[in-house]
Amino acid sequence: MAAPTNWSDLRSDLHRRMDSAVEVLKKEFSGLRSGRASTSLLEPVVVEAYGSAMPISQCGTIGVPEPRMLTVQVWDKGLIKAVEKAIRESGLGLNPSVDGQLVRVPIPALNEERRKELQKVAGKYAEQARVSVRNVRRDGMDGLKKLAKDGHISEDEIHKHEKEVQSLTDDTIKKLDDLLAHKEKEIMQV
């Protein structure tokens, strides 16, 4: 996107980018199923294939044959080991097994240890989202300085708009923290 030439454009860009961070976190949380298997659980998994990193969904078909089992039907036999390794090293606490071109991923029972692991993963996702929002805030502050330097807004307007950017940042961080608290509560429920 081209650099905004007025406060209105800058503000709408900041809103869009911060809202995007919230949506990404919601999507990542949807993959942290606390009970049943879900294909979205494997969405964040990235496989090293053909000399580059690609989402697991581009390597095979993800299925849910039973409530506590995921499967990945790998399209290319040469990628089976890479898919298995990517799932094992994803930090999701999953232990896949290979059956021909099918990678079976049993979903472990949610004992106390597994719940704490999921809480740590949720916390990591939330922190990534907070960092993203803080980066957007920094970009917004830099954008305000550029608008002032280019003569589009006055010094007084900078201070007023900086408070708006900070307020937007605080509100978005609160949304992220609320989402995390809700997800942690969901994970810990029996």
Image: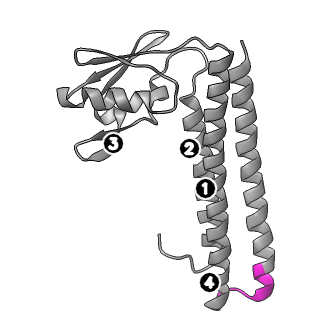
The answer to which of 155 and 125 lies nearer the viewer is 125
Front position among marks 3 and 2? 3
Picture quarter containing residue 34? top right
Choose mark 4 or mark 1, whichever is in front: 1
Residue 153 colored in magenta in the image: yes
Give the residue pinned by disc 2.
24
Residue at 24% from the left image edge and 47% from the top image edge:
51
* Residue that carries the numbered disc 4 in the rendered image: 146
Q: Do labels 2 and 1 touch, CB within 8 Å? A: yes
Corner quadrant of residue 120: top right
Q: Position of residue 38 (x, y in %)?
A: 49, 21
Check disc 1 and report the residue beneath it: 132
175 on left or right of 129: right
Residue at coordinates 30% horizontally, 36% vertically from top-left? 58
From mark 3 to mark 2, how far is it between C-alphas? 18 Å
Secondary structure found at label 4: helix
Element class at badge 1: helix
Residue at the spot 57% in from the left edge and 27% down from the top edge: 32
Give the class, few, some or many, for how many residues have Cα within 10 Å of label 1's Cα (few <14, many ≥20). some
Amino acid beneath label 1: Ser
Judge by depth and name the residue closer to the eye, 16 or 135. Answer: 135
x and y percent of residue 139 in the render? 61, 70
Q: Earlier in the sequence, mark 2 or mark 1?
A: 2
Write down the region rendered in magenta.
Answer: 152-158
- 159 in relation to 114, above or below: below
Q: How much space separates mark 2 and mark 1, taking CA atoms? A: 10 Å
Let me know if residue 18 is in the magenta part.
no
Q: Amino acid at mark 4?
A: Lys
Q: Residue 137 location in percent, x, y?
A: 67, 65
Question: Residue 54 bears which disc, if any?
Answer: 3
Label 3 and label 4: CA atoms lie apart by: 37 Å
